[in-house]
Image (spheres, rainbow, N blue to C red):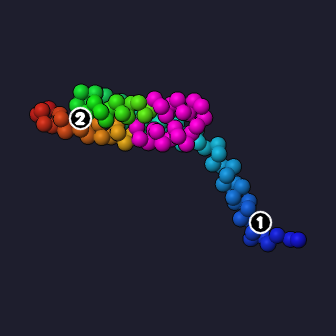
Amino acid sequence: MRINPSHETRWWWVIALVAGTTGCGNTLYAVQANSASSKLEEAQELGAEQYAPYEYFYAREHLQKAQSEASEADYSDAIDLAETSEEYADKAIRLAREAHRGAGR
């Protein structure tokens, strides 16, 4: 029995897609973690530990957990945790900036 060429082509695309994405988890994690880390540094420089402690420490703990998950090659969870870290670091940055503006700085 001969497989329809278009059906065979689709299977090659599926195989190529799966093969191409399985090795990218660590790369996607590295990009997301670097972004979250940069935002966390910015938040710290703005004094977010004082002005937005919940958001700052939430972001920091999520980044640390992301690093732990990545060290165990659980990149899907690591990426999700790093995304959450970046989201809360952004909130901490915003709140710290608002506090500075409110203080007349």
- Label of residue 55 in the image: none
Q: Residue furthest left?
A: 104
- Label of residue 8 in the image: 1
Image quarter where the C terminus lies is top left
State the separation of the CA atoms marked 1 and 2.
56 Å
Residue at the spot 46% in from the left edge and 29% down from the top edge: 64
Q: Which of the 4 image quadrants contains residue 7?
A: bottom right
Helix, strand or loop at mark 1: helix
Q: Position of residue 71 (x, y in %)?
A: 57, 30
Q: Position of residue 96 (x, y in %)?
A: 23, 35
Q: Position of residue 52 (x, y in %)?
A: 26, 33
Q: Which residue was labeled with disc 2?
A: 96
Q: Is residue 38 visible?
A: no
Part of the protein shown in magenta: 64-85
Image quarter where the N terminus lies is bottom right
Residue at the spot 60% in from the left edge and 44% down from the top edge: 24
Above or below residue 5? Residue 56 is above
Residue 68 among those drawn in magenta: yes
Query: Which sits in the foreground, 59 or 93?
Result: 59
Q: Amino acid at mark 2?
A: Ala
- The chief SS type of the magenta part is helix
Left or right, 78 with respect to 47, comes to right
Q: Which of the 4 image quadrants contains residue 87?
A: top left
Q: Position of residue 30 (x, y in %)?
A: 52, 37
Q: How many marks?
A: 2
Residue at the spot 73% in from the left edge and 62% down from the top edge: 11
Above or below residue 20? Residue 36 is above
Helix, strand or loop at mark 2: helix
Sort mark 1 into few (<14), some (14-19) or many (20+) by Cα contacts within 10 Å: few
Q: Amino acid at mark 1?
A: Glu
Q: Is residue 104 visible?
A: yes
